[in-house]
Amino acid sequence: MKSCSRYVAVLHIFALVIVACNAQSVSVIELMLEGEPFSSDEFDVGRYALMFMVPDECSACETSLPWLQHAAEAFPEIRFLLVSPVPLPEACSEWISVLIDSEGRLGGAFGIDRVPEISLLVEGVRVKEVDWPFTEGGLFRACAESLLIEILRPDPRTLLGEVAPAIDAVKLDGVEVSIVELQGPQLLVFFRVGCSTCWETLEPLGELSAELPVVLIAMSSSDAGISDSDREKLRRFEQAAGLTVILGYGAQIPQDYNLAISPTFCLVDSAGLVAEIWEEELNRVTLSERLLTLSRGKASD
């Protein structure tokens, strides 16, 4: 049976039993799903089965497609997606969504060197791969084994009551900044620049900055930093919202703050302690209550 080479090997993660670990996601990759932007950090939540394939001259891909459809019906806990560098025939898209990886970046990050290959993900971690040649039974067995695997994600709430870690970052103008002793109350907002949906959560921050200082930490997993267009977008937002924007590169900040989800909001009190944490969405009611409590505590000191 003929298989096709398309991708370059980079990353391999294996697991066959129940796993608990802290895992770092690969760099965020922007893709297209059914004509809409799709960010690879969507894989950070839930279970996925990604079948990498090409539509032309790959008889092995054609053979394995019905098996994948049967597996999708048998394992509803897993979201099945096809990954292709080009759009696929409508017959495929009738029963499964297709991710367009036009530049092969996702395949490169997962180390795909030939297709078809299936990657099983749990909470953003690739826990199992099914290489060609495989059988329908082998695919079903791999899916069943992946359901036994649990990933323990970092939990920023373990920092509650602790001193907020120092932050080494860079301002938008390129000047390095080190925040050693965080003085509050202030709100730290951590978000990944490559997360398209995260930008939508920034809109209310301008209003919040009138109530307390807000520091937006825009993070990139690449040492190369962010694009000029994203930098300009952040600069305009900083000026319009009246808050502070700093850039954080690499893994140090996510590790220090146990970040797993973007965005994450961290309220620091006047003593520099972490007073509250919100992931993904800020609870304005809880924030107001915590600020009131902090102000009363400060007044009684």
Image (cartoon, helix red, strand yellow):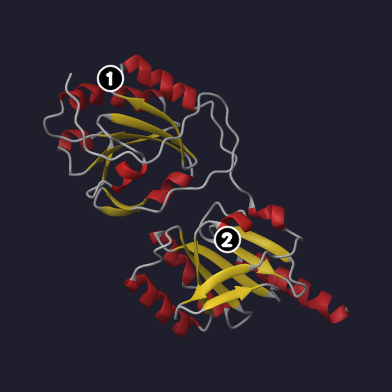
The CA span between labels 2 and 1 is 42 Å
Q: Quadrant of residue 156?
A: bottom right
Q: Quadrant of the C terminus?
A: bottom right
Where is residue 29 drawn, in percent x and y? 35, 53
> Where residue 74 sits: x, y (%)?
39, 23
Say which quarter of the image contains residue 19. Answer: top right
| Callout 2 amino acid | Ile
Quadrant where the N terminus lies? top left
> What residue did someone put label 1 on?
133
Q: Which residue is mark 2?
A: 253
Give residue 148's position: percent from left, percent from top. Answer: 54, 26
Q: Do the residues bearing badges 2 and 1 touch, measured as CB atoms within 8 Å? A: no
**Is any atom of residue 211 visible in this view?**
yes
Q: Identify which residue is drawn at 39% across, 67% down.
A: 226
Give the numbered dot on residue 227: none
Q: What SS does tag 1 mark?
A: loop
